[in-house]
Image (cartoon, helix red, strand yellow):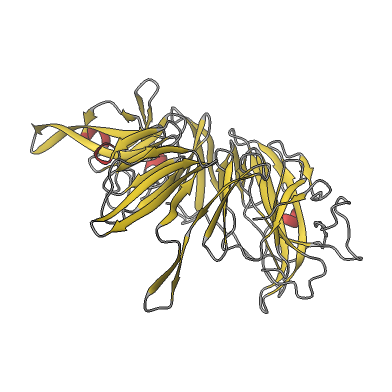
């Protein structure tokens, strides 16, 4: 994949000290506490209309990255804090929201809390924590009844039943409100590996897959995803059909099988292996389209197609000016009507090209140091935001843009659109002695570059107890 230069946590010179922070005084909006402001030290991207924020008390004497009395909460798209909780004993950062729910691990990794976007605690589960001292892994917690996988508002609970003549494991799937939705018929005598793959899909090793968004169980032999469902469907397998002699070599009829997030198997049309480029590779599916290409020979792509599942059409990239520059580390990003390809030029610099779905060039090769493509926007070099036709929509304010040098740095998340929101956030941090000095500034933009807020309002926030 092309070098995208994802410099999350890149170091920056302090350009302007603009103090945009949050307050613990719930009666005020962005109020000060005894003449001091609270310090915001993390704001996430949006998911399901909310974003997580972490901050520490203004009265803290030492502003470390962990904070002294750290708190975590959710803001809406107006920058208003909806709820918060004391995160002193929180094991990990909370997950992003998916299907309206997020998960918080606490109590040294022994408790899982399911929460919705309003801050309502929907249910709690036992977890098993693990520590590794370098010689052995030690587990602690309720080993007989605990959650082994979770996501999308669903949890898989493993129950161990044992006795003189019995030793078996039961696997039950619950929704966010602790209602049972499915239980495996099989009760193995040994634990099985359970994993959440994203988009509501759970795998049970050598048994099958549960697709929570459709409530569908699919046996293992019919669905073998090898990674997260990053798009509409996951690449599953190349299926070989009839073999025939063609000249001095054997050719095969092949098609590609996918499975969507509801558990439905969907196939491409059958074509010859030689037509697709022999060593066939494929991308995930976005907007009912995928890329099919012949694996690199001498680090060069031989053939490349966009496949459309709606009409089973296949359009080939034939312009050798672009095809010849696509090496094995190329990357791609689908937009609603465009595809962005990133690769290296002959000068060893990174370039992106924008095509339509017929491989017509919309934007000629453009150099970049950093690129992100999300919500039909192209973000280049942490500063410039373009639409799908390559037109500049707006520039991110200079105080949020990366530069380097000096002993004091501002560290912030790389800009990425999520939920039609772009969050930029800088933090002042003395990297050399590990001291956190405070928030430099935050801002949230809409798709057209309108700044929606640059402060967080605390006036309506409520505290929840985990």
**Image quadrant where residue 249 sits:** top left
Q: Residue at x 46, y 33 (%)?
A: 213
Q: In this view, does 359 lie to the left or right of 377?
A: left
Residue ranking furthest to the right: 35
Could you tell me if residue 405 is visible in this image?
yes
The correct choice, above or below, for 178 with respect to 315 in the image is below
Could you tell me if residue 317 is visible in this image?
no
Q: Which residue is drawn at 8% across and 38% down?
A: 248
In the image, 301 versus 30, the foreground residue is 30
> Residue 52, position in %: x, y?
66, 51
The correct choice, above or below, for 61 with respect to 3 in the image is below
Q: Is residue 315 left or right of residue 466?
A: left
In the image, 239 versus 70, the foreground residue is 70
Q: In this view, does 395 lie to the left or right of 291?
A: right
Q: Which residue is drawn at 76% across and 39% down?
A: 450
The correct choice, above or below, for 82 with respect to 315 in the image is below
> Residue 271, position in %: x, y?
23, 28
Number of numbered markers: 0
Q: Is residue 401 left or right of residue 269?
A: right
In the image, 457 versus 258, the foreground residue is 457
> Residue 275, position in %: x, y?
24, 32
**Image quadrant where residue 20 sits:** bottom right
- Considering the image in quadrants, where does the C terminus appear? bottom right
> Residue 125, position in %: x, y?
51, 52
Residue ranking furthest to the front: 164
């Amino acid at each position: 994949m092309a070098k995208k230069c994802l410099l999350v946590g890149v170091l920056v010179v302090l350009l302007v000290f603009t103090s945009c922070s949050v307050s613990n005084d719930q009666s005020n909006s962005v109020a000060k506490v005894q003449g001091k402001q609270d310090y915001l030290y993390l704001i996430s991207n949006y998911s399901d209309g909310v974003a997580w924020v972490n901050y520490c008390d203004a009265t803290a004497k030492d502003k470390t990255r962990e904070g002294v009395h750290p708190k975590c909460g959710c803001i809406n798209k107006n920058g208003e804090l909806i709820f918060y909780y004391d995160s002193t004993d929180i094991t990990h950062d909370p997950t992003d929201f998916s299907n309206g729910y997020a998960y918080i691990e606490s109590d040294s990794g022994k408790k899982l809390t399911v929460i919705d976007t309003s801050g309502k605690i929907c249910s709690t589960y036992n977890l098993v924590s693990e520590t590794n001292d370098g010689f052995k892994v030690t587990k602690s917690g309720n080993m007989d009844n605990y959650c082994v996988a979770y996501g999308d508002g669903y949890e898989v609970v493993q129950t161990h039943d044992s006795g003189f003549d019995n030793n078996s494991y039961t696997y039950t799937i619950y929704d966010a409100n602790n209602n049972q939705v499915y239980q495996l018929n099989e009760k193995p005598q040994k634990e099985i590996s359970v994993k959440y793959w994203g988009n509501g899909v759970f795998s049970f090793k050598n048994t099958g897959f549960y697709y929570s968004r459709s409530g569908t169980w699919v046996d293992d032999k019919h669905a073998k995803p090898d990674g997260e469902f990053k798009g509409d469907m996951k690449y599953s397998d190349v299926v070989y059909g009839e073999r025939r002699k063609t000249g001095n070599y054997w050719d095969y009829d092949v098609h590609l099988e996918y499975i969507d997030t509801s558990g439905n198997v969907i196939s491409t049309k059958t074509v010859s292996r030689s037509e697709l480029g022999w060593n066939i590779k494929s991308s995930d599916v976005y907007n009912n389209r995928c890329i099919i290409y012949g694996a690199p020979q001498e680090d060069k792509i031989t053939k490349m197609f966009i496949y459309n599942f709606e009409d089973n059409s296949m359009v080939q990239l034939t312009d050798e000016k672009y095809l010849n520059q696509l090496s094995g580390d190329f990357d791609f990003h689908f937009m609603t009507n465009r595809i962005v390809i990133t690769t290296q030029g002959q000068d060893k610099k990174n370039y992106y090209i924008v095509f339509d779905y017929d491989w017509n060039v919309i934007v000629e090769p453009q150099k970049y140091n950093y690129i992100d493509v999300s919500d039909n926007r192209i973000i280049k070099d942490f500063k410039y935001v373009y639409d799908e036709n390559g037109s500049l929509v707006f520039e991110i304010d200079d105080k949020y843009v990366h530069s380097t040098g000096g002993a004091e740095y501002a560290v912030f998340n790389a800009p990425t659109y999520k939920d039609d929101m772009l969050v930029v956030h800088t933090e002042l941090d003395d990297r050399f002695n590990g001291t956190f000095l405070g928030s430099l500034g935050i801002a949230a933009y809409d798709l057209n570059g309108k700044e929606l807020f640059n402060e967080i309002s605390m006036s309506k926030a409520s505290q929840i107890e985990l």
